[in-house]
Image (cartoon, rainbow, N blue to C red):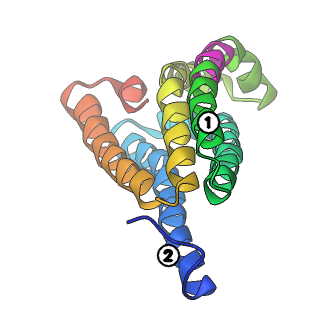
Amino acid sequence: MKQNMITGSPAKSLFLFALPMVAGNLFQQLYNIIDSMVVGNYIGADALGAVGASTPIVMLFVAMATGMSIGCSVLISQFLGAGKKEEMKTAIFTAFISVTVLGVLFLFCGQILTDPLLYLLKTPKDIFSDAKSYLSIYFWGMGFLFCYNGLNAVFNGLGMSYIPLVFLICSSVLNVVLDLVFVKQYSMGIEGVA
């Protein structure tokens, strides 16, 4: 259901609109938590350290995607509220072009900058290789991260904040299943979790 922010109680409208976004942020954090749980329980302490060492780098890219999403949703909602449908369509199209370009750009930047970023964070040598493997595979999924955030921007801007939450719930469940399948069934180690 599309949340109408201009009728009824402002506090209730804001709460109902924000609740799915808060839940979505929790599910987004769940990715690394689940990865850490699977790694800690089925792979070992060094692999868990590698995921932990990778987390600040992952969060940096997630923050950039989220920031872009917030900026786009503000523009889309302003155009929608002002009744400027053509400008809104242009903002949506621009958001999709931006997420595609940035997703590809950050994929390559991530691949190139993995070693320097891990050195900068003083990643211990005994987990460096695992952290590098984890990040290398993670960066191949960067396009999906940015695509999700682009969709998030559009739906939030249109007042439909529950739709991105549904995507995140489904992808979180899929993440758990695939983590367990790749690690337990196929013994892929940290690469399977990534």
Q: Residue 106 colored magenta?
A: yes
SS at mark 1 in the image: helix
- Decide: is 172 above or below 53: below
Q: Position of residue 161 (x, y in %)?
A: 48, 59
Which is in the foreground here, disc 1 or disc 2?
2
Looking at numbered disc 1 in the image, what kind of residue is underneath it?
A: Val
* Direction bottom: furthest residue: 9
Q: Position of residue 38 (x, y in %)?
A: 36, 44
In the image, 194 versus 156, the foreground residue is 156
SS at mark 2 in the image: helix
Mark 1 highlights which residue? 58
The answer to which of marks 1 and 2 sits earlier in the sequence is 2
Crowdedness of circle 2 by 10 Å Cα count: few (<14), some, many (20+)?
Answer: some
Q: Position of residue 54 (x, y in %)?
A: 61, 34
* Residue located 49% across and 50% down the image: 155
Q: Residue 112 colored magenta?
A: no
144 displayed left or right of 120: left
Mark 2 highlights which residue? 16
The part of the chain drawn in magenta is 102-111
Characterize the magenta stretch by its predominant secondary structure. Answer: helix
* Direction left: furthest residue: 185
- Decide: is 99 above or below 56: above
- Quadrant of the image occupied by residue 15: bottom right
111 displayed left or right of 186: right
Crowdedness of circle 1 by 10 Å Cα count: few (<14), some, many (20+)?
Answer: some
Distance from the alpha carbon under mark 1 to that under mark 2 = 29 Å
* Residue located 62% across and 33% down the image: 90
Which disc, if any, is residue 104? none
Q: Quadrant of the C terminus?
A: top left
Q: Position of residue 65 (x, y in %)?
A: 64, 38
- Quadrant of the image occupied by residue 11: bottom right
